Amino acid sequence: MNRYKSKILSVAQKTGMDGAVIAGIISRESRAGSALKNGWGDHNNGFGLMQVRFLFTFIEIDRRWHTPHGAWDSEEHILQGTEILCFMFNVIQKKFPGWTANQHMQGALAAYNMGPDNVTSFDAVDSRTTGRDYSNDVLARAKYFKRCGF
């Protein structure tokens, strides 16, 4: 992960997203690239460190198809994945205005994994995520990366 640290911190500064959270997603999605083959993972459905889906789920709230930007390990790619996370944060914030900022982040992480339409309540935030633990796992990884200076 350290080889991507400067790119992650640059994107964090540009977007206002916590670099440790970005690192947590990269760790979960691609094991810092070690789980990828030529930049592709998830049976060639996800691209890059943050596993942007080439044919991202067509959901009611987000009607965009994502075309991966940049090389699989580039700052441009990390920026694209982080912008998707920021978009999900805003969607979850509007969908659940009574939640705390930490709950919004957890909901945004779940939405990053499975789309915002599948986030229906905080009690079941991970009920439809990969492994049913995506947001909790990314946040646990983020705590580790925070201690490592991300």
Image: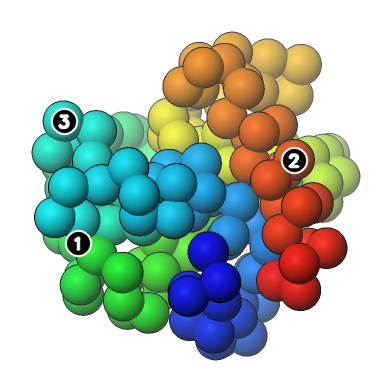
Figure check: 9 above or below 144 = below
Q: Secondary structure at mark 3?
A: loop
| Earlier-in-chain disc, 3 versus 2 | 3
How did the renderer colour the structure?
rainbow
* Amino acid type, label 1: Pro
Q: Which mark is residue 68?
A: 1
Query: Which residue is located at x 68 percent, y 15 percent?
Result: 124
Query: Which residue is located at x 76 percent, y 52 percent?
Result: 144
| Earlier-in-chain disc, 2 versus 1 | 1
Disc number lying in front (3 or 1): 3
Residue 73 location (% of width, % of height): 31, 69
Q: Secondary structure at mark 2?
A: helix
Q: Taking the image as drawn, is residue 84 in sight?
A: no
* Amino acid type, label 3: His
Residue underneath mark 2: 140
How far is mark 3 from mark 1, CA to CA? 16 Å
Query: Which residue is located at x 56 percent, y 72 percent?
Result: 2
31 relative position to 9: left or right: left
Figure check: 18 above or below 129 = below
Q: Which mark is residue 80?
A: none
Q: Taking the image as drawn, is residue 98 in sight?
A: yes
How far is mark 3 from mark 2, CA to CA? 26 Å
Q: Secondary structure at mark 1?
A: loop
Q: Which mark is residue 43?
A: 3
* Amino acid type, label 2: Ala
In the rendered image, the quadrant that contains the C terminus is: bottom right
61 relative position to 138: left or right: left
Figure check: 136 above or below 150 = above
Query: Which residue is located at x 63 percent, y 41 percent?
Result: 138
